[in-house]
Amino acid sequence: MPEVHKIDINHVAKLARLKLTEEEAKHYAEQLDGILSYIDTLTRYNLDGVEPTAHAIPVYDVLRSDEPRPGFTQEQALANAPKRTADQIQIPAVIE
């Protein structure tokens, strides 16, 4: 028999700094209950000896190997800067 989950969705919303209407709170509570019920279903399976995986099929790293190589000089890094001040990129002030 599935375990009954009682989670205070309004408390969770407050922790996430979300304001939910009563309708949204009910909707999300139902979704969360469905997720937790599914997890209960998964816990019924005997998984002794099964290696944990992130993918159902093997996934291999397709990126190149990380090898050191020369970087930009300061002049190259600043070459396309629209404005420069004292060998630094000058950006407009962002004030909100």
Image: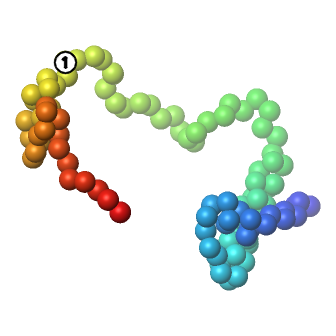
For the N terminus, the image quarter is bottom right
Res 30 visible: yes
Corner quadrant of residue 23: bottom right
Q: Residue at x 17, y 35 (%)?
A: 88
At x 65%, y 81%, the residue is 21
In the drawing, does residue 70 fall left or right of residue 38?
left
Q: Quick check: 71 left or right of 79?
A: right
**Local secondary structure at mark 1:** loop
Viewer-closest of 35 and 42: 35
**Amino acid type shown at disc 1:** Pro
The residue tagged 1 is: 70
| Residue closer to the observer: 57 or 34 | 34
In the displayed structure, would residue 37 be above or below residue 89?
below
Residue at the image position 80 percent from the left and 33 percent from the top = 48
The scheme the figure's colours follow is: rainbow
Going by the image, does 33 lie left or right of 6? Answer: left
Indicate the quadrant containing the C terminus: top left, top right, bottom left or bottom right: bottom left
Residue 79: percent from left, percent from top: 7, 35
Quarter of the image where one finds residue 30: bottom right
Q: Quadrant of residue 46 in the image?
A: top right
From the top left corner, tell me how far across and down residue 5 is, in percent. Answer: 84, 62
Q: Is residue 94 above or below residue 77?
A: below
Neighbour class for label 1 at 10 Å: few (<14), some, many (≥20)? few
Q: Is residue 34 visible?
A: no
Measuring 41% from the left and 30% from the top, which residue is drawn there?
61
